[in-house]
Amino acid sequence: MERSRRVEIAKLVSSLILCQLAGMTGLIFTKPAIFSWYVSLKKPFFTPPDWMFAPVWIILYILMVFAAFLVWRKGCHQKQTRSALILFGVQLILNALWSFMFFGLRSPLAGLIEISILSVAILLTLQSFLQISRVAGLLLIPYFLWVAFASGLNLSIWVLNR
């Protein structure tokens, strides 16, 4: 296999590992609270059933993997690409941090503050990805929309339970 093909595969696999690490980190805080603290909260009428969250997040993380890969394959020698990937990394950290804030700390208010910052980070990442790869940017739109929905859900949970 030629070197450039191996590098491309390594970038794809690395993107997959990084995104899955963020997801698994969030799951560490989410899973214990789902059947204890979270079930005791008052939730708005538009709360999706619990079983829906896992498949949605799996799809979103797969889209993030391919978006990151499409940008990364453009090469890190360009400042714009490096900046976009740094933004992507920041939003991944913020993504995992929300689970800690909301579920780990059992604080809808902390989660709300954090998800507001996450939403901005996703939007900035999406915009920077669009400038490098239109497809990569478009792949992040469902993620942004889901987090926007989750922000409304988080706000409603905070209001109903304060």
Image: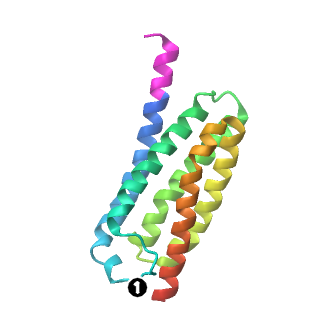
Q: Nearer the viewer, residue 94 or 135?
A: 135
Horizontal placement of 81 versus 108: left or right?
right
Q: Residue at x 51, y 54 (%)?
A: 93
Q: Residue 56, image x and y in percent? A: 42, 56
Label 1: how many Cα within 10 Å (few below 14, some 14–19, many 20+): some
Secondary element type, mark 1: loop
Q: Residue at x 69, y 36 (%)?
A: 132
Q: Residue 82, image x and y in percent? A: 65, 37
Type of the residue with mark 1? Lys
Location of residue 161 (image quadrant): bottom left
Horizontal placement of 126 versus 55: left or right?
right
Q: How many marks?
A: 1
Q: Residue at x 54, y 62 (%)?
A: 147
Q: Residue 49, image x and y in percent? A: 36, 69
Location of residue 129 (image quadrant): top right
Q: Which residues are magenta?
A: 1-10
> Is residue 7 shown in magenta?
yes
> Is residue 117 shown in magenta?
no
Q: Main secondary structure of the magenta part?
A: helix
Q: Residue 96, image x and y in percent? A: 46, 58
Q: Residue at x 33, y 83 (%)?
A: 40
The residue labelled by disc 1 is: 42
